[in-house]
Image (cartoon, rainbow, N blue to C red):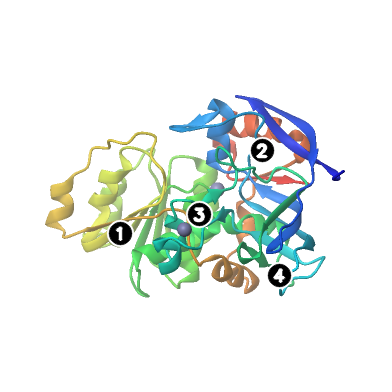
């Protein structure tokens, strides 16, 4: 009989209880990871509240969580380069490896991806996860599993910055200073971008952005952000804009902020599909739209940046809860969005 472990199981909308489930057995190419930290993401909050995100409908019981890091506790016979006790971060998308996108390297676009915590795929709010070794990354000395759990959102930021093709010396504006906005800002800083503007409507987030080194933080609740940034840039606008709010009015704001020939990269997911868009505004500037779906090939880079001390990622964690408190943690996060930047679950 297989050994048992703890799992924080979602039993229905708003309902999570601790359960006992069989421990996973690593396949030949898999690593067994004893999970230590898991970040809470907006997707977890939506699933917890509604049991679904659009067409993604959960069956219960279900385990959420897709931002895990932990300690290697075993592995299959084909795994190389890891040993028991190594601290690791897990990239949560298992890809097929044989489709056109996987073969060309754009594996985040694999139609058969099994992404942790979406319907039908067990997530990481449990003691152990077995996962393919090519998506398990060793954390170097000095990088904690707390930081390892934050590599997932940091990777979204790094991929967004890659998508935008920003060059050294260009200016950037990040819309939204939540977890993803701040991670995008840190990724831009790691790229050496100094003309770095960011906006939000919540004081806690604006203060954090200032603390983490934004050149100028704008208060979108009281300022006309476009007018202000035009003033700060001698009416040129910014070369690259990163949309990290998912708010409907942010797209036209982003277009308004662009310098001629600039690029607007859409990182945040929108609550609705049909967003009013000033396409003529984009055309007159010969602006470029880019978008960003998760990430590819950036875990090693994000981890390297962490190890080098150039992304103070720990600073974005505002709350920690134990695994047993997961239901409480998600409820708290949903009820107090203005007090939370990032919640991390500790096991
Ligand atoms: Zn996430
Ligand atoms: Zn594939």
Q: Which residue is mark 2?
A: 63
Sequence-wise first label, 4 or 1: 4
**Residue receiving disc 4:** 78
Instruction: Give the answer, above or below, for where 271 lies relative to 266.
Output: above
Above or below residue 93? Residue 49 is above
Task: For marks 3 and 4, give the one nearer the viewer.
Answer: 4
Horizontal and vertical percent position of residue 334? 57, 31
Q: Please give the name of the residue rendered at 49% of the width and 40% of the height, measured from the top-left corner.
A: 202
Per the model, the C-alpha gap separating discs 2 and 1 is 47 Å
Residue at left offset 73%, top offset 36%: 8
| First along the sequence among labels 3 and 2 | 2
Q: Secondary structure at mark 4?
A: loop
The disc at residue 232 is 1
Dot 1: within a 10 Å radius of its alpha carbon, few (fewer than 14), some, or many (20 or more) residues?
some
Disc 4 C-beta below 8 A from ligand 2: no
The mark lying in front, picked from 1 and 3, is 3
Q: What residue is pinned by disc 3? A: 182
Say which label, 3 or 4, has the lower sequence index: 4
Marks 2 and 3: in contact by CB < 8 Å?
Answer: no
Mark 3 neighbour class, 10 Å CA radius: few under 14, some 14 to 19, many 20 or more: many
The quadrant of the picture occupied by the N terminus is: top right
Q: Mark 2 vs mark 1: which is more N-terminal?
A: 2
Crowd class of label 2 (few under 14; some 14 to 19; many from 20; radius 10 Å):
many
Could you say whether the residue bearing mark 1 is in a helix, strand or loop?
helix
């Amino acid at each position: 009989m297989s050994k048992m472990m703890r799992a924080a199981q979602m039993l229905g909308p708003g309902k999570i209880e601790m359960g006992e489930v069989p421990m996973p057995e690593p396949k030949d190419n898999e690593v067994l990871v004893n999970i230590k930290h898991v970040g809470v993401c907006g997707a977890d909050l939506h699933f917890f509240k509604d049991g679904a995100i659009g067409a993604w409908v959960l069956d219960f019981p279900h385990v959420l969580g897709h931002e895990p890091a932990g300690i290697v506790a075993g592995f299959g016979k084909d795994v190389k380069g890891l040993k028991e006790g190594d601290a690791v971060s897990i990239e949560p998308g298992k890809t097929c490896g044989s489709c056109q996108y996987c073969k060309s390297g754009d594996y985040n676009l694999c139609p058969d991806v099994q992404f942790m915590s979406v319907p039908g795929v067990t997530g990481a709010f449990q003691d152990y996860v077995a996962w393919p070794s090519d998506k398990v990354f060793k954390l170097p000395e000095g990088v904690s599993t707390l930081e390892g759990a934050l590599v997932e959102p940091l990777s979204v930021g790094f991929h967004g910055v890659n998508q935008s093709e920003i060059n050294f010396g260009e200016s950037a504006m990040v819309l939204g200073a939540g977890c993803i906005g701040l991670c995008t800002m840190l990724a831009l800083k790691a790229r050496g971008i100094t003309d770095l503007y960011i906006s939000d409507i919540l004081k806690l987030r604006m203060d954090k952005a200032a603390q983490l080194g934004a050149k100028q933080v704008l208060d979108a609740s009281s300022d006309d952000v476009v007018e202000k940034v035009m003033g700060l840039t001698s009416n040129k606008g910014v070369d690259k804009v990163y949309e990290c709010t998912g708010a409907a009015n942010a797209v036209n704001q982003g277009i308004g902020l662009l310098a001629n020939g600039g690029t607007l990269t859409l990182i945040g997911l929108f609550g609705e599909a049909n967003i009013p868009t000033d396409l003529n505004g984009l055309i007159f500037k010969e602006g470029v739209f880019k978008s960003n779906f998760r990430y590819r090939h950036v875990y090693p880079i994000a981890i390297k940046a962490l190890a080098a001390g150039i992304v103070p990622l720990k600073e974005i964690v505002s709350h920690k809860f134990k695994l047993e408190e997961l239901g409480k943690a998600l409820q708290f996060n949903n009820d107090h969005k203005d007090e939370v930047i990032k919640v991390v679950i500790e096991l």
